[in-house]
């Protein structure tokens, strides 16, 4: 037998998949793809509550933005990356 326990339901919340370094109630630098999808620029994203696989976005992203959720620690010294 399987079931789902719902602890809280949030309405009208922007969320993303939980990034590697994403902790609740923190601010992280995520790479956001530009309009052409060929480059990504680091943006500060304020995170809120989280679940196992997703996390709430309080500020820094808008609906429709695409971010890289992979471990990008190799690029900590860079604010922009080019994608091939």
Image: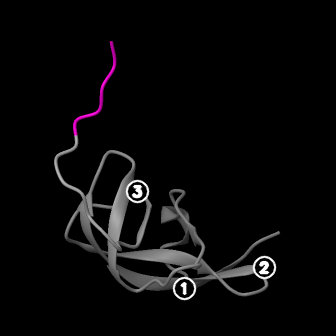
The structure residue drawn at horizontal position 55% and vertical position 71%, both measured from the top left corner, is: 75
Colour scheme used in the picture?
one colour
Residue 53 is situated, as x and y percent measured from the top left of the image, at 39, 48
Helix, strand, or loop for circle 1?
Answer: loop
Q: Is residue 78 above or below residue 68?
A: below
Q: Answer few, some or many: residues within 10 Å of disc 3's Cα (few below 14, many 20 plus, some between 14 and 19).
A: some
Residue that carries the numbered disc 1 in the rendered image: 79
Query: Which of the two residues, 23 or 72, is positioned nearer the viewer here?
Result: 23
Q: Please tell me whether mark 2 or mark 3 is closer to you in this view.
A: 3
Q: Quadrant of the C terminus?
A: bottom right
Q: CA distance from mark 2 to mark 3?
A: 23 Å
Residue 76 is situated, as x and y percent measured from the top left of the image, at 48, 73
Q: Is residue 69 left or right of residue 34?
A: left
Q: Per the image, is 17 magenta?
A: no
Residue that carries the numbered disc 2 in the rendered image: 38
Residue 5 is situated, as x and y percent measured from the top left of the image, at 22, 36
Q: Quadrant of residue 22?
A: bottom left
Residue that carries the numbered disc 3 in the rendered image: 18
Residue 40 is situated, as x and y percent measured from the top left of the image, at 64, 80
Q: Answer few, some or many: residues within 10 Å of disc 2's Cα (few below 14, many 20 plus, some between 14 and 19).
A: few
The structure residue drawn at horizontal position 34% and vertical position 61%, both measured from the top left corner, is: 55
Query: Which of the two residues, 62 or 4, is positioned nearer the viewer here?
Result: 4
């Amino acid at each position: 037998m399987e079931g789902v326990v719902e602890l809280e339901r949030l309405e009208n919340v922007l969320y993303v998949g939980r990034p590697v370094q994403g902790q609740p109630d923190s601010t992280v630098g995520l790479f956001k793809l530009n309009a052409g999808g060929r480059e990504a620029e680091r943006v500060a994203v304020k995170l809120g509550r989280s679940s196992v696989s997703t996390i709430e976005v309080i500020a820094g992203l808008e609906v429709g933005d695409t971010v890289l959720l992979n471990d990008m620690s190799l690029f900590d010294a860079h604010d922009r990356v080019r994608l091939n």
